[in-house]
Amino acid sequence: MVSNQKTPTPDSSSAPLPDIHTLSHKELASIIAGLGEPAFRVKQIESWVWEKNAQSFDEMTNLSKALRAKLAQTLSMGNCTELMKQVSTDGSRKYLLQFPDGVTAECVGMPTKNRLAACVSTQAGCAMGCAFCATGKAGLTRSLTSSEIYQQVMHIADDFQTRVTSVVLMGQGEPFMNYDNTLAAMRKLNSPEGAGIGARHLTVSTCGIIPGIMRFANEPEQFTLAVSLHSANQSTRNKLMPGVKKYSLLHLYDVMGEYVDKTGRRPTYEYALISGVNDNDDELGALCDFCRGTLAHVNLIQLNDIPGSPFRPSTEERANQFVQHLASVGVEATIRNSRGADIAAACGQLSQDYKLLG
Ligand code: SAH
Ligand code: SF4
């Protein structure tokens, strides 16, 4: 189902109707009962919404026309419209989606043999202002709803005509500045009546919002956590990531220890290597000290170019030295090749800057 027409609202001057994707099973059941319909309708409707990704009530052909009309007067489908799609030479596809209030966000589908990974946004823009990130440059427009986060995944599944097997919440935005909606979307993506993606295949990436990490440690699901570290040296990190200055590395270290104790899960630290900034021997030493003896895995990312940025990626040789040195102190590290760089879909390249679209 790739059509993206908006569901007509009966009276466009009234307040927006609640988006069906934001309702719990119970809430939907009570609305259906209120419309005088039998309980089995709820399952039928849920199947259209979550499995078939219907874009309008009219598609729900096993419901009577009268019920479809009643639903359209009561609820909205919260649709998104695809404004743009770009296809990379590596097969990744980047989409610019627009939500009913005109706000846009980007997401990326990355296929490999038998698998399809989705990278989705949790906010339109980002307020954290990391110096190396295109999203941070434009500031925050607004947080996305759980439905808008979920719909990005379904849009990718529809376009590739296959199911999404893993999701990283690493598009635009800081997920833990939009905690409730992010968690609600992850739960729906995980649930059997939603996308049915295993919790371990759902990864949230945070720049290090400590209250969010503490909350996340107490969630019952086996979701995966990644933390953008980028430097284990406080003054370098303050410069690169001014938005998280107030959360010190010492505090982050302690909280990550608690996270591992509580969950037994292996977190990932993301580290974009920037030539002459966070790739010298001092920085490598600090990174080793931060990770030594912890369960953490380090993901080294070759910095992706963003327009107007003074930063350059480190050499491949330096990245390999980081891997070897980390291994020598017992820390597992890998170099992650970003995908979709030719269509500006790689980490940190998603931007709100679509002035060229007119
Ligand atoms: N706000 C969250 C998630 C989105 S960013 C976070 O910061 O973790 C996803 C990842 O891309 C983060 O690890 C981020 O630090 C990294 N990133 C940002 N800009 C980048 C760039 N220019 N090159 C490589 N990685 C970048
Ligand atoms: Fe926001 Fe993450 Fe970009 Fe930092 S790296 S500005 S937290 S999206």
Image: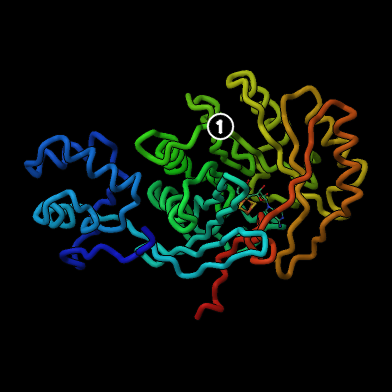
Which residue is at the front of the view, 314 or 5? 5
How many numbered circles are shown?
1
Residue at label 1? 200
For the view shown, which residue lies furthest in the left direction? 36
The three-letter amino acid code for the residue at tag 1 is Arg
* Displayed quadrant of residue 15: bottom left
* Displayed quadrant of residue 332: top right
Which residue is at the front of the view, 255 or 264? 264
Q: Quadrant of the N terminus?
A: bottom left
- Picture coordinates of residue 216, whole percent (x, y): 53, 31
Q: Residue at x 22, y 42 (%)?
A: 44
Is the residue at mark 1 in contact range of ligand 1, meaning its CB lies under 8 Å from it?
A: no
Which residue is at the front of the view, 266 or 144? 266
* Displayed quadrant of residue 276: bottom right
- Picture coordinates of residue 237, whole percent (x, y): 75, 46
In the displayed structure image, the side of residue 208 where residue 74 appears, left or right: left
How crowded pointer 1 is (Cα within 10 Å; few <14, some 14-19, many 20+) is rated as some
In the displayed structure image, the side of residue 233 where residue 150 appears, left or right: left
Q: Residue at x 16, y 66 (%)?
A: 11
In the displayed structure image, the side of residue 282 where residue 306 appears, left or right: left
Q: In the rendered image, is residue 8 in sight? A: yes
Q: In the image, is residue 38 above or below residue 145?
A: above
Q: Residue at x 56, y 78 (%)?
A: 356
Q: In the image, is residue 278 above or below residue 202?
A: below
Q: Residue at x 50, y 50 (%)?
A: 122
- Picture coordinates of residue 329, whole percent (x, y): 87, 27
- Picture coordinates of residue 168, whole percent (x, y): 57, 44
